[in-house]
Image (cartoon, rainbow, N blue to C red):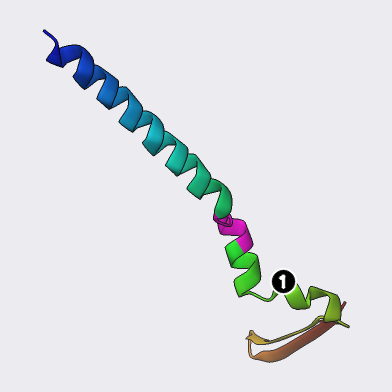
Amino acid sequence: MTKSPRLATIFCLSFAVFALVATARAQTAPSLGEQIAKAHGLEGFGQIDAIRFIFNGEVLGHSVSRSWVW
């Protein structure tokens, strides 16, 4: 009977340690959104002068072209 309370205590302490480690690790890792933003150049966002988009296509045998500048 003496082993059961010891086992329960060890289990509770180890669970608490794992829970603390998991929360500490989650706080230091950047979120998925931050990782995606950094991968696509968020740091250089202030250096953008304009965004240019050009669309070329063909509709019913006619060439169609459109461009936008923001």
In the visual, does 36 lie left or right of 3? right
Task: Give the quarter of the figure containing the N terminus.
Answer: top left
User: Total of numbered circles in the picture?
Assistant: 1
Q: Which of 48 and 30 is in front in this view?
A: 30
- Where is residue 21 shown, x and y percent of the image? 44, 42
Please determine whether, in this image, residue 14 is positioned above or below residue 42. above
Please determine whether, in this image, residue 10 is positioned above or below residue 31. above
- Where is residue 54 shown, x and y percent of the image? 75, 86
- Dot 1, how many residues are within 10 Å of its Cα: few (below 14), some (14-19), or many (20+)? few
Q: As drawn, which residue projects farthest toward the front?
A: 2
Q: In which quarter of the image is residue 47?
A: bottom right
Which portion, as a residue range, is magenta? 29-34
Please determine whether, in this image, residue 47 is positioned above or below residue 16. below
- Where is residue 14 shown, x and y percent of the image? 32, 32
Q: Residue at x 64, y 74 (%)?
A: 40
The amino acid marked with disc number 1 is Leu
Is-magenta flag for residue 52?
Answer: no
In the visual, does 26 lie left or right of 63? left
Please determine whether, in this image, residue 57 is positioned above or below residue 3. below
Q: As drawn, which residue projects farthest toward the left?
A: 1
Q: Which of 45 and 15 is in front in this view?
A: 15
Q: What element carries label 1?
A: helix
Q: Which of 33 and 60 is in front in this view?
A: 33
Q: Which residue is drawn at 64% across and 70% down?
A: 38
Task: Give the quarter of the figure containing the C terminus.
Answer: bottom right
Is-magenta flag for residue 32?
Answer: yes
User: Which residue does the numbered mark 1 point to in the structure image?
Assistant: 42
Q: Which residue is drawn at 32% across and 23% down?
A: 12
Q: Which residue is drawn at 21% across and 18% down?
A: 6
Q: In which quarter of the image is residue 3?
A: top left
